[in-house]
Image: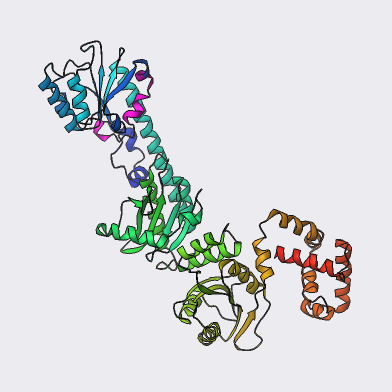
Amino acid sequence: MTVPEQASADSLSARPDRASTSQFTPADLVSTVTVRDVLGLSVMTLAHVEVQAAHGHLGRIIRWVHVAESPRAGKLLNGGELLLTTGIGLGSDEATLKSQIAQFARAGAAALLVELGTYWEQIPETVIKECERNKLPLLVAHRELRFVTVTEQVHSRILNDQFAQISAMRDVSESFWALMFNGAPPEQLVVHTSRQLGCPVVLEDLSHRVVYYAEGHELPSELLADWEKKSRFWSVENRHQGLIAEPIRVQDPQDSKVSWESIDIQAQGSHWGRLYYRGVTDNPAEGAHVLRHAAMALAIERLGSGAPHSWNGLIDRVSLNRLMSNRFTTIDGERTVLEAAGFPTRGRKLLALDIRFHGQEITAEQVRRMLESSASRSFALASTSPEHQDRISCAWSLTAESNLEASCLQLADRLKSMAQRVSVVVSSELTGPVDLSSALHQVKRADYLASANGVHLFTVSKQRIDGLMHSLRGDVRVQAFVDSTLEPLILHDDRNGTDLLQTLEAILRFPTSRSAAADALHLSRTALYSRISTIERLLKVDLGDGNTQFTLALAIRARA
């Protein structure tokens, strides 16, 4: 069987019969077996093999096993051989021994294994010193060592590793081809890459913004800490290489013990960014092979994309989804991830917006550009709402000196040219990502709609209790409170197709005016009172009681 030294994914996929039809030669073999690995084989244990020189070089790769019982042995090597000898062919005088050891080392031999008892009773001091000086591991067998058994076991280990590697490489190739064939989005390709490697993976654009990441077992805030600074450092360090078609390994500038491997995403003269993974993979296919296929899959995805030259849509959609899903454990972690994606939050004014276009389709990218051009040094995230295609959810980061009212008016002026009737629901000034997460839900739920042509601004005031309750939604105690308090209504609505929960929300929004609650629900007062009676019966409460109203209001807010 042939194992090409530089086996490519294409050759494995296009020529599946190649491995089974060719003659296997030592020169073709690509091994991952080290001298240290070989020391653990049963034949070595039985022969009481020990290391007597160059202990620090046991990580050398053994590519082949070769018997060295001839004075010409050193001239026949190709490198990577485990040399087996009784010492009879190495010479008897000191000068010859020195010459032979030096020749083995120059030829790139992996190690020298000597069996005692046939020719030498003990290893000559010259051999030990020369092996140490030439950094050639010297292994000594104190019992009988069958060279043929050593050869069989070492070659079997090498071949088994190679079979595993080829199988893993084919699995990687086939899995990425399947994803490409089915039109997998970039985020799925990044997650798949992380699973194949068993390592965190980061995709960035050419501005060093994080497009998407799969953190694995790492904390996102630790994985992405100072990302732009690190990425620019790597870019400068490797500028002489140009575009990187083959993966390269770089050191983390903040932690010398941590390494990353990276590759450029490029095809047909276009360059979209870079893909990194952190650490060392256990995949037998090796990290470079996985990274090459991931880069190819992402490049093909870009070529087939409707907006191939920008990652903005993905960055905005993912960032807003993470904000609204509250997928963070700390505020600093949330800031780190948002800033790595190019959305600063420290020392800035933040706004949440829900922009609603009536009768005209506007893209999120158009809105994003309009927001960023409406205020100096501002940054925005904009994504079409999955539930309402005519609505665009936005997060806006402005400088501390910005005049929010003036910026919003300028935005309104720009929107006039885009649609005949626009409703802009905007939050009050926010100071951090937690408030922003809550405000995005608030402006989305707000029921303000423009009734006449033009651009209409509606401001939703920030209520601290909303931010607090939103941050506590993941607490199991709060979840249990909500479930036990509202479950009868939720079950009734599910079984009967009613909307008693919505009715309760309106009643609590207008606790002193049943008429206002009826108007908000577009019901008659008689129909509303009928629903109130059903709610009180199901929950076994009196909706006129202040404590009951407070308890139910907390449950509604925590569930929202």
Would residue 181 be visible to someone looking at this image?
no
Q: In the picture, which quadrant includes the N terminus?
A: top left
Residue 311: quarter of image: bottom left
- Pinpoint residue 465: horizontal percent, then vertical percent: 69, 69
Please report the residue visible at 41 percent of the width from the left and 50 percent of the height from the top.
278
Please report the residue visible at 75 percent of the width from the left and 59 percent of the height from the top.
482
Q: How is the image coloured?
A: rainbow
Please report the residue visible at 28 percent of the width from the left and 19 percent of the height from the top.
140
**Magenta segment includes 540:** no
Above or below for 319 versus 118 = below
Q: Nearer the viewer, residue 454 or 470?
A: 470
Q: Nearer the viewer, residue 274 or 295?
A: 274
Would residue 557 be visible to someone looking at this image?
yes
In this rendering, the count of numbered labels is 0
Please report the residue visible at 58 percent of the width from the left and 57 percent of the height from the top.
329
The reply, left or right, for residue 154 in relation to residue 315 is left
Q: Which residues are magenta?
A: 24-44
- Pinpoint residue 326: horizontal percent, then vertical percent: 60, 61
The reply, left or right, for residue 170 in relation to residue 29 is right
Residue 2: quarter of image: top left
- Pinpoint residue 199: horizontal percent, then vertical percent: 45, 47
Above or below for 114 versus 500 = above
Q: In the picture, which quadrant includes the C terminus?
A: bottom right
The reply, left or right, for residue 396 in relation to residue 474 is left
**Magenta segment includes 29:** yes
